[in-house]
Amino acid sequence: MQIRTVIFATGNPGKMREVREILSDLDARVMSMREAEAFCEPEETGTTFEENALIKARAVAEKARGLWPGLLVLADDSGLEVDYLHKKPGVYSARWMGEDTSYRLKNAAIVGLLEGVPDEERTARFVSAIAAVFPDGTEAVVREAVEGIIGYEERGENGFGYDPIFYLPELGKTSAEIPMEEKNKISHRGKALRRMEEVIRAYENRHRQ
Amino acid sequence: MQIRTVIFATGNPGKMREVREILSDLDARVMSMREAEAFCEPEETGTTFEENALIKARAVAEKARGLWPGLLVLADDSGLEVDYLHKKPGVYSARWMGEDTSYRLKNAAIVGLLEGVPDEERTARFVSAIAAVFPDGTEAVVREAVEGIIGYEERGENGFGYDPIFYLPELGKTSAEIPMEEKNKISHRGKALRRMEEVIRAYENRHRQ
């Protein structure tokens, strides 16, 4: 079954833009959950990014079943793993301290817990898993990460979330100090989306009419 | 030189009450920093509770020098050590995430970072160091702790700070679920104050006229 519709399970316009761009030469309509009338927020009970991405993709696929022809559902789950904090906040990154708590505070919490900790123990990574439910019901998950270290203070205005404290040693900047376009090239989500793009191409090649 | 005046370096009325009670049969006037016109908030640059307590006691002793006869200055530094978080927030307990950030959020941050962590790895302790600068310029520091585990949610209304997430296994309650009187008996600060009381008695015995 060929792909004719794609739903990306996010409420984030920035993510939607990124996905549309990456999937632009796919001959399919790319929609958000709302556009597709398949909005849902299942409880993310998984203990890994992969599980949570799959939970979301399956829930949307279930909700959109029969509504759209040749439907591919994509969903992502992302987070920050701080090695010194046993890879937390990890899959709890968004929910940690409550969804409504500002990242200024969340960032202050992490930086504070790493006070006095030397660079070599401040390693961290942004992880992104992207799950897909294909028109024939098969599933796929990919995972990518970008490595960095936790900074000593917030820096930069371009990013969001944990970006201002995520320092990329090779660039000498935090994730919030690099322009959005450049960030999409190196980001965990950008990398995972491009990996998923390859998986989608392979599916298309197998199902070409 | 006999003790005739005691300044306890705190702005916390609850702590003052506790100190007055414990030192009540000492023949000396017990005052807060404000009452003694010796208010100061030195930067707590120490890396241990003992150092920070000493920094405070010395700063107040310096400020009050010559103002009061037979002056004993006491200062405390307390905090929560969470083993899973490398004994943080520790000496940063009060400043962590900013002095003005509610403990509801600080507690949510800790509980969130311990999500999925089993009881045996949730060990923690409240630590209190109390420093003294005696009328003859000699110094002393004592340190006490109370062991517990980090709970899964906030419980209890009696305490403050990290009390609602600090579970005392022997009592089957959090530090915020036990009445204040009972808490003073078992608390880190209560224990340290009683240890310091013994040190003060010994000083008095040596300097009795």
Image: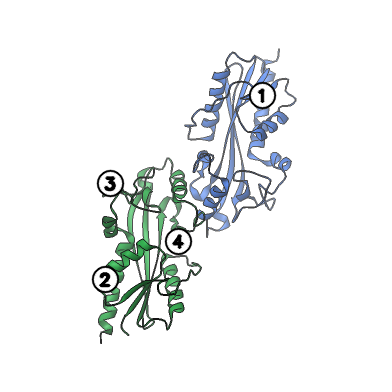
Chain colours: A blue, B green
Q: Is residue B72 above or below residue B99?
A: below
* Residue at horizontal 49 percent and vertical 57 percent from the top: B99
Q: Are marks 1 and 2 in contact (CB under 8 Å)?
A: no
Q: Is residue B192 visible?
A: no
Q: Which residue is mark 3?
A: B172
Q: Amino acid at mark 2?
A: Ser
Residue A31's disc is: 1
Q: Residues within 10 Å of mark 1 (few under 14, many from 20)?
A: some
Q: Which chain does the residue under circle 3 lie in?
A: B
Q: Which residue is mark 4?
A: B91
Q: Amino acid at mark 3?
A: Gly
Q: Which residue is mark 2?
A: B24
Q: Is tag 4's residue or tag 2's residue first in the polypeptide sequence?
A: 2
Q: Is tag 2's residue or tag 3's residue first in the polypeptide sequence?
A: 2
- Residue A38: quadrant of the picture: top right
Q: Residues within 10 Å of mark 4 (few under 14, many from 20)?
A: many
Q: Which chain does the residue under circle 1 lie in?
A: A
Q: Which chain does the residue under circle 2 lie in?
A: B
Q: Residue furthest right?
A: A25
Q: Secondary structure at mark 1?
A: strand
Q: Are marks 3 and 4 in contact (CB under 8 Å)?
A: no
Direction from residue A161 to residue B13 in the image, left or right: left
Q: CA distance from mark 3 to mark 1?
A: 52 Å
